[in-house]
Amino acid sequence: MTPPIIDNQRARRIFLQHHALAEQPTGSAKGEALADLVRQLGLVQIDSIATVERAHHMILRARSQSYRPDALAPLIERHRSLWEHWTHDASILPVELFPHWRHRFATNRETLLKRWTGWQRDGFHERFDDVLNRIADHGPVSAADVGKDENKSAGGWWDWHPSKAALEYLWHVGELAITRREGFRKVYDLTERVIPAPLLGLRHSCEETVDWACSSALDRLGFATPGELAAFWQAISIKEARDWCQAALARDELIEAQIEGWSGQLRRVIMRPATLETEPPAPPNRVRVLSPFDPALRDR
C-alpha cells in the first residue's frame, strides 16, 4: 500500500498544533497551568544567551502572552512539579519523568568518567566524596562554594576546576540534582532532597523507557522519523526507536505517510492514524517571536 501524501500546508498545521503554536496564546500561565504547558511541550531548553530574553522564558511566552518569568522558578524550587536535567541540552522537564532518567544516569556512570578523564583537569574524580559529604552536612552548594583551594583557571567556559567537574559529574549520574539557580548559576543538592519521595522509588525497565520515549516524542511532534523520535529526549538509540516503530507498525498502531516539504520533496515518516484522520486547526493570524532554542526550531 502506498503511504498517503500530506501536503505542505497540512503538514505545517500538524507541526504547529503539536508544538502548541496553533492555539491563541491566552489563558493562565502560572501555577499548575504553567506546569501543564511544560508537560505539553515535554521540555523547555535553558540557555544563558539573553540578547532579548532567556530561551526558556521566550519559549513559554510565545505560547502564553500572560507568562511572566517569575512564575517559573517556584514550580522548580518550591512546588517541585518541574526539575532540570539534560536532554539534547539543559532543559526544564516535568518531574514525573525522573524515573525514566535512571537509565541515562546508569549510562552516564559507565561512560562519562572515562570520557572526562583527560578532558577535565586531573583529580576531579577524587573530589566526589568531598563534594557529597559537604552537601550532606551543610546543604546545597554552587561551584563557587567548593574547591576554594583549587586553581580557578581563566582557560575558557569548559575549563572547570576539579570540584566543579565533580558537581557536574554527580549531577549527570543522578546523585545530585539542581535545587535552584542563582542568576544563572546552578545550586546543587542531594537528589533525595529535590525529587519528591514517591518518584525516587519508581523504576522502569529499559523496554518501558523505550516505549515511553518514542510514544511521548511522537505525541509532541505529530509525525517523525525514527531518528527524530530518538533525538527528542536523547534517552534512547536510533536502533531502539527504529525497532519500536517497526513493532508499532506491525500492530497497526502507527502508519507510514509522506510529508511534502517546502520544496515539494516528499519525506517518509510515521504517525498515528488519528493524526492523519483529524483536520489540524489553522494557526492564529498573529506574529510570535520564537527563541532559536524553541522546540519547534531546535532541529534546523
Image: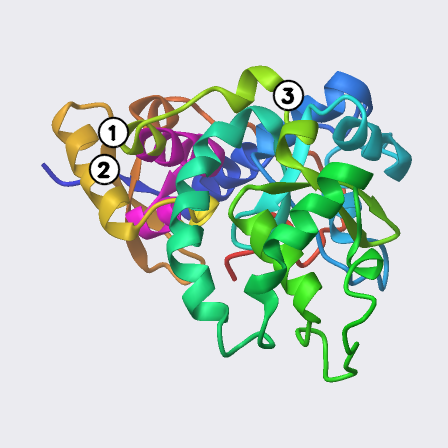
CB contact under 8 Å: marks 2 and 3: no
Residue under pointer 1: 254
Residue shown at the point (53%, 77%) measured from the top left = 119
CB contact under 8 Å: marks 1 and 2: yes
Left of 58 or right of it: where is 37? left
Residue 134 visible in the shown view: yes
Q: What residue range appears in magenta? A: 210-230
Outermost residue toward the left? 1
Left of 63 or right of it: where is 210? left
**Of the numbered discs in the image, which one, if any, rests on residue 196?**
3
SS category of the residue bearing label 2: helix
Residue under pointer 2: 245
Tell me which colouring the rendered structure shows: rainbow
How far is the residue under mark 1 from the one under mark 2?
8 Å
Relative to 2, is 292 above or below? Answer: below
Left of 110 or right of it: where is 125? right
Residue shown at the point (73%, 84%) measured from the top left = 155
In front: mark 1 or mark 3? 3
